[in-house]
Image (cartoon, rainbow, N blue to C red):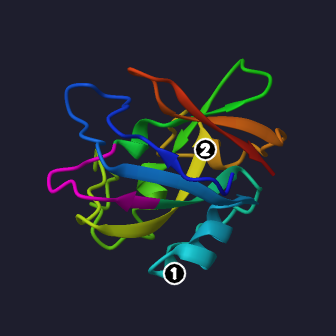
Amino acid sequence: MNEWVELDGAFLNARSENTKGYSLRVTNAELLSYNGYIEKYGLDKSKKTEGLDEPSLICLEIELVNVGNEDGIIFIFECKLIPDRKNMYYLPGTVLWAQSESLFPDDGSVRGIRVKEDSEYTVHVPYKININDDIDYTEFKRPVKDRSFELVISNLPVRKVIVITL
């Protein structure tokens, strides 16, 4: 954490990403509930949902930088957060994340992030257990018990991982 990792052409999705000139660093990791995320980062605080106060998310504050890539894109939505026990993984909760980003579609269907050339941008990514339950929100009712993780940010041609500790 807190160290810049240059992607420089390393990627998770070979057909769609263009990460040359991109770097990122994780500056903070915190345990939050669904409602805690809305309260802290949500654009509309009224989107809180009764019963979703269990600390079920790992929220990563990630700074992204793009130096000199006019057509760059990074698929941060495909980055997996793997606990030390390595028997499951967490994924970005894109529908919840859309509550904090005005340019994301409400359904969370965005695939990649483009950072304007020669600029940087900070995101607050809510990682949740790898299940989707749009009716009962089960994924936001299971407390996170893990405290150490690996964030996989690229697989090819070089695997790059950031160690995260809560």
Residue 19 is situated, as x and y percent measured from the top left of the image, at 30, 42
The amino acid type of the residue labelled 2 equals Lys
120 with respect to 46 (left or right): left
The amino acid type of the residue labelled 1 equals Ser
Name above or below for residue 43 compared with residue 51: below
Is disc 2 surrounded by few (<14), some (14 to 19) or many (20+) residues within 10 Å?
many
Residue 130 in sight: no
Task: Identify the residue shown where x is 77% and y is 56%.
Answer: 54
Residue 107 is situated, as x and y percent measured from the top left of the image, at 32, 54
Task: Identify the residue shown where x is 31% and y is 61%.
Answer: 106
Q: Which residue is mark 1?
A: 46
Magenta segment, which residues? Answer: 64-74
Q: Which residue is mark 2?
A: 128
Task: Identify the residue shown where x is 15% and y is 51%.
Answer: 71
Task: Judge whether residue 73 is colored magenta.
Answer: yes
Main secondary structure type of the part rendered in magenta: loop
Task: Judge whether residue 137 is colored magenta.
Answer: no
140 with respect to 12 (left or right): right
How far is the residue under mark 1 from the one under mark 2? 21 Å
Is disc 1 surrounded by few (<14), some (14 to 19) or many (20+) residues within 10 Å?
few
Residue sitting nearer the eye, 64 or 101: 64
Residue sitting nearer the eye, 79 or 34: 79
Name above or below for residue 31 compared with residue 43: above
Whichever of labels 1 and 2 marks the residue nearer the N terminus, that label is 1
* In the image, farthest residue toward the left: 71
| Residue 66 image-quadrant placement | bottom left
Q: Which mark is residue 98?
A: none
Name above or below for residue 49 compared with residue 80: below
67 with respect to 52 (left or right): left
Residue 105 is situated, as x and y percent measured from the top left of the image, at 27, 60
